Amino acid sequence: MNYIEVETYEELSRKAAAIIAAQVISKPESVLGLATGSSPLGTYACLVKAYENKDLDFSKVTSVNLDEYVGLTGENDQSYRYFMNTNLFSKINIRKECTFVPNGCADDVKKECREYDERIESLGGIDIQLLGIGLDGHIGFNEPDEVFTKETHLVDLDPSTIEANARFFPSADDVPKQAVTMGMGGIMNAKKVLLIANGKNKEEIIKKAFFGTITPKIPASILQLHPDVTVIYSKN
């Protein structure tokens, strides 16, 4: 594991973007595993700037996102499809038909989960997976559990996750209670993993996840077993 601690969120974002940019430059047809939430916003802004400066070309890139809320369409401004379109896809030259986000409104969620894993496999796997981490150690929406779930699956969101995401909704009651998330198999099969975290409140879970016991009760701890993980953390 490559553990990097930096002083500011801006430095974290620059370093994370540089790692992703290096992947795209070295392999223009890269498959990027992408994440949502507040943590990657700075990283995406840096990637957009690099594209605008003609330093990056995303025309051959394919992306697969970690997760999506159940019940929110891509037009809903709280959906993760909307988030990705707004903060990254609409600002770079990635082909929209090559951007994949789980369908949280699928009539058959189990089928959607199975087909999502099949799509990732058909793409040859993920070259680099960007992750954030929740205060309970969740990655994607893989919540603390008794086991590590391998496949993309439907998950009931933990109350702490609902509370953390309530700031994006009118109230906690408006936060969807379920999500579709890539499982640990998809994440662990990525050739590289890049996890970013910022804020003093993330310090304890970072220590538990990467310097403590490997346990499904702290889902991110499984990343200790991955052969190519970079963690970038900023207290600010």
Image: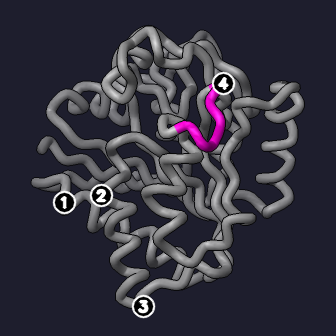
Q: Mark 1 and mark 4: span between their CA atoms?
A: 34 Å
Residue drawn at 49 percent across, 39 percent down? 77
Residue 1: x %, y % from top left: 41, 51
Q: Which residue is mark 4?
A: 71
Q: Mark 4 and mark 2: span between their CA atoms?
A: 27 Å
Specify the quadrant that holds the C terminus. Answer: top left
Q: Is residue 207 left or right of residue 187?
A: left
Residue drawn at 54 percent across, 41 percent down? 80
Residue 234: x %, y % from top left: 19, 47
Residue most extreme to the bottom: 54
Q: Is residue 139 left or right of residue 148?
A: left
Residue type marked 3: Lys
Q: Main secondary structure of the magenta part?
A: loop
Q: Nearer the viewer, mark 1 or mark 4?
A: 4
Q: Is residue 85 left or right of residue 171?
A: right
Tell me which numbered mark, 1 or 2, is placed earlier along the sequence. 1
Quadrant location of residue 22?
bottom left
Residue drawn at 19 percent across, 53 percent down? 9
Residue type marked 4: Gly
Q: Which residue is mark 2?
A: 42
Q: Mark 1 and mark 2: span between their CA atoms?
A: 7 Å
Tell me which numbered mark, 3 or 4, is placed earlier along the sequence. 3
Tell me which numbered mark, 3 or 1, is placed earlier along the sequence. 1
Q: Which residue is mark 1?
A: 10
Q: Which residue is mark 3?
A: 54
Residue type marked 2: Gly
Q: Secondary structure at mark 2?
A: helix
Q: Residues within 10 Å of mark 3 (few under 14, many from 20)?
A: few
- Report the magenta residues as a range: 70-76
Q: Mark 2 and mark 3: span between their CA atoms?
A: 19 Å
Q: State if disc 1 and disc 3 touch (CB < 8 Å).
A: no
Residue 83: in magenta span: no
